[in-house]
Amino acid sequence: MSSTIKVLLAEDQSMVREALAALLGLEADIEVVAQVARGDEVVAAARAHDLDVALLDIEMPGATGLEAAAALRREQPDLKVVILTTFGRPGYLRSAMEAGAVAFLVKDAPAVQLAEAIRKVLAGERVIDPTLAAAALADGANPLTDREREVLRAAADGSTNAELAAALHLSQGTVRNYLSMAIQKLAVRNRAEAVRMAREKGWL
């Protein structure tokens, strides 16, 4: 690794991305060598540059930062991934770790803290926002199966069971069962409440 830490910055809001790049550029040992605004552009940008760290927002068009992190882990397992998000949701933290991220910070953290996190992950450390880590432990693991999450995500737009069954290539009875199990596990009254709770927890 060279003395300068080469960073890819993926963030869909241009003002935020440019501000982050400018702040990181003030650090003598950090250089933002690539910027993208879409999650589905991350892997191509990583291929095109010799990177040390990929700094990814979660909510992006094309692909989420979590999906991009998983893709990077498959293609460039030595590349360190830092997730930076507005949404301090405990479920996102767990998902980020499963996707291969080694750091998870919220955007309102001071810029100096972000720069220090980048240095720490290159030294082999994990860096987790402490408030979020505590909340994730308190919340516990995501109780939903992959299929239950898939059906809940699809149900978020108000689709009927018949529409969900057609879209997901399942029977209506199977769709009903998955929704019923999700509602039961989350201890809510209906699918709308299940979708809302799962989103708030970062489980979808």
Image: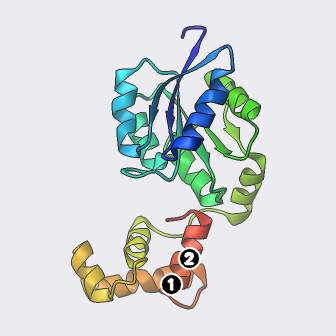
Total marks drawn?
Answer: 2
Percent position of residue 110, x then y: 76, 38
Amino acid type, residue under disc 1 in the picture: Ala
Quadrant in the rendering for residue 178: bottom left
Q: Name the disc covering residue 136, or none.
A: none
30 horizontally vs 69: left or right: right
Residue at horizontal 53 percent and vertical 80 percent from the top:
194
Foreground residue among 17 and 172: 17
Residue 75 visible in image: no
Amino acid type, residue under disc 2 in the picture: Arg
| Residue where numbered disc 1 is placed | 192
Percent position of residue 41, x then y: 36, 38
C-alpha separation, residue under disc 2 versus residue under disc 1: 6 Å
Residue at horizontal 73 percent and vertical 45 percent from the top:
129
Percent position of residue 79, x then y: 48, 27
Q: Is residue 168 above or below residue 47?
A: below
Q: Quadrant of the N terminus?
A: top right
| Label 1: which secondary element | helix
Quadrant in the rendering for residue 142: bottom right
Marks 1 and 2: in contact by CB < 8 Å?
yes
| Label 2: which secondary element | helix
| Residue where numbered disc 2 is placed | 196
Residue at horizontal 26 percent and vertical 83 percent from the top:
163
